Image (spheres, rainbow, N blue to C red):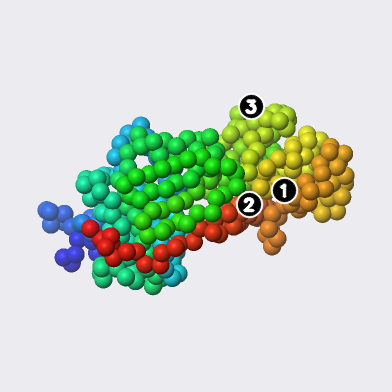
Amino acid sequence: MSDPLTVRTLHNGADCQPSCRQPIKIIPHHSGGWTAILFSENIALLHPTREHPALTHRRHEDIADDIRPLLLGQSSSLNRFAIATLVAVDGPAPRDVGAQMLITDEQRWGFLSGGCVEDDVARHGREVIAKNKHRLLRYGEGSPWFDIKLACGAGISILVEPARIDDPAIATLLAGYRDRKPVVWQSDGETRVARYFERTSPCLPQWNGTSFFAHFEPPLRLVIIGSDATALALAGLALHFGTETVLVDPGGPVNAPFAGLRYQRSADAQTLPLDSWTAVAVVTHDRESDESMLAAALASDAFYVGAIGARSRLPSRIERLQQQGVSTAGIERLRAPIGLHGFGKSPQDIALSIMSEVMRDFHSRSAQASAAGVSMSSVAPASVVGR
């Protein structure tokens, strides 16, 4: 038994049932003895690689999908870094054009494929930081690197550019995120420009062979009006997905039920944080204060407004909303009963059905706004691929 990382499955006796079998690692000591470690205690040792430690285990950082909160969270200690952007996709691919990674000398966040290229992109990113010179990488079809395969069979182009936290374009991008203002972004790898734009998304070519254009919208915000188990389950689920979450419970407990939650105890509809990137879910049953807040939401720019309740009570709810001055167009915007069909009636099931509908509508809305921004270049110019 010379392999220091041999994995074995052992029982605690002949009568052990399959459920009590646990995989362990047998690790030799320099003194000649052996130590058994439960597999779950050190999963990073399952597939050891000396040169690429990031391959040894799944990392929470890999699922990051927006570099803006990452930059804000790292801004106090971050100086130089690299941004890797998926600028062109030819064929089926796990990620859409515009997906990004954030790379520093020590860490990386985000993903651009199904795990095929991220380590190599991070290596290029660190060289980009060191040399302060951008690169345009090509993987898959048309790539000079035959040893890096894409399981999807596509060809992808990735712009890797050096940046600094004090770059004016980065400052505008982060200010737009904080202030919930959409930002137009343009970069050729050397020069970046960012500016605010009006609510209507511009028609942007995402890649023209030289420069990458994108629009960064404010993140999804979910306003939940309610106090029961369904409201709490929905708030917890939204927070788990990284959604900016506001729980409105007029007259509720003093303290918020979850950390990271924006909590509002006022019944004043004017205090609701509503904009074009906000969804509102009323998940209580016919409280008088909820109707005024529901009416305010239907009159706002919120892209989604829904209310829980039996379909048989919907006519009376609509009548009360009309008495509060909600227009016919506003009434037509109301999602009721709320959530997707086919789920159960437990608080968790209802929360999942609501969150699924909200996220579907949010991403569908963003996709429609970006429909004109398809890639204009099917293959990256050979002269700029690689080093």
Mark 1 and mark 2: Cα distance apart in space:
9 Å
**Which residue, given by chain and number where applicable, does mark 2 sit on?**
358
Looking at the image, how many numbered discs can be counted on the residues? 3
Q: Name which residue type carries label 3.
A: Val
In the picture shown, does residue 14 fall above or below 108? below
- Left or right: 107 with respect to 182? left
Residue closest to the eye, 163 or 384: 384
Q: Name which residue type carries label 1.
A: Gly
Quarter of the image for residue 10 reads bottom left
Q: Name which residue type carries label 2.
A: Val
Residue closest to the eye, 344 or 134: 134
- The quadrant of the picture occupied by the C terminus is bottom left
Where residue 282 appears, x then y in whole percent?
A: 72, 43
Give the class, few, some or many, for how many residues have Cα within 10 Å of label 3's Cα (few <14, many ≥20): few
In the picture shown, does residue 311 fall above or below 132? below
Mark 1 and mark 3: Cα distance apart in space:
26 Å
Residue closest to the eye, 286 or 100: 100
**Which residue, given by chain and number where applicable, does mark 3 sit on?**
254
**Residue 103 appears in view:** no
Quarter of the image for residue 276 reads top right
- Left or right: 387 with respect to 83? left
Where residue 245 appears, x then y in whole percent?
A: 59, 40
Give the class, few, some or many, for how many residues have Cα within 10 Å of label 1's Cα (few <14, many ≥20): many
**Which residue, given by chain and number where applicable, does mark 1 sit on?**
306
- The quadrant of the picture occupied by the N terminus is bottom left
Residue shown at 35% from the left, 34% from the top: 166
Nearer-N-terminus badge (3/2)? 3
